[in-house]
Image (cartoon, helix red, strand yellow):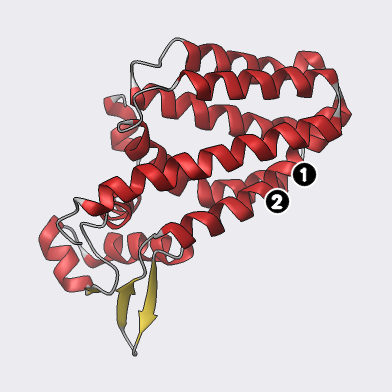
Amino acid sequence: MHQNRLRSVPIGVRLAETLRDRIVRGSIPAGTHLVEDRVAEEFDVSRGPVRDALRILSIEQLIEPVGRRGLRVIGLGPDGVRDLYAVRRGLETVAVTEVCRARAEGGLGPLHRSVETMRGSTGDVDAFATSDLAFHRALYETSGNRRLLALWEQIEPLFACILAITNSIDGDLEPVVVDHSTLLEVIASGDERRAVDVLEKHLDGSRRRIITALEQVWAHSDGS
């Protein structure tokens, strides 16, 4: 990430990224109570950014209120991953269907570029995760449905965190490239039914791969 990009990201968002990573990894285990003052002290920030970060994590269902002022970590177990993918499956099925109906080949440029970037970055897990997410974001953008895109943006940071962790464990990313390439070919053909079928198989495989990888992380987590 470029230095100017780092400066432009609000402190609360950066703090949410750090806490999200720890929660997903299990180093902050489920059941942990988070206190604003303690978080602010640990990261040497004011309580304002802490509140912003905790608000983000609450929306993502990684933490929940307990009592009058406390917050408790929910965490992200296998069931949480399955729930996330159930939501994503619903959203992305609509997006893929809309893109197939548009049949605008010129509008598929961002999808093609994302696949090519993925193909050239299988040795760089961060770049690969970025291009993977760029592909799926492009689906929502190309669909033309702004509400779909807005809903995806609510869960995209959590998927970014998950991919960053799991891609570092999964040594062979080439099958993921093939999955995206195949999906793009079917979308370009305009075959809605087959595109949805390919999408569902891709997401099912991704869900299984991520749960397997995260279970390895959780098994070695200090918080387990």
As drawn, 143 above or below 224: above
Callout 2–callout 1 Cβ contact below 8 Å: yes
Residue 60 visible in the snapshot: no
User: Tag 1: residue type?
Assistant: Val
Residue at horizontal 44%, vertical 28%? Answer: 130
SS at mark 1?
A: helix
Q: Residue furthest bottom?
A: 68
Whether residue 3 is visible here, answered yes or no, is yes
Residue 5 locus on image (x, y percent): 34, 31
Which amino acid type is shown beneath numbered disc 2? Gly
What residue is pinned by disc 1?
Answer: 94
Which residue is labeled 2 in the image? 90
Q: Is residue 27 left or right of residue 96?
A: left
Q: Position of residue 51 (x, y in %)?
A: 32, 67
Q: Which of the 4 image quadrants contains residue 83? A: bottom right
Q: Quadrant of the N terminus?
A: top left
Q: Residues within 10 Å of mark 1 (few under 14, many from 20)?
A: some
In the visual, does 6 lie left or right of 145?
A: left
**Residue shown at 52% from the left, 32% from the top:** 133
**In the image, residue 61 lies at what x, y percent?**
45, 65
Q: Give the quarter of the image for residue 149.
A: top right
Q: Nearer the viewer, residue 70 or 52?
A: 70
Residue 124: quarter of image = top left
Callout 2 environment at 10 Å: few (<14), some (14 to 19), or many (20+)? few
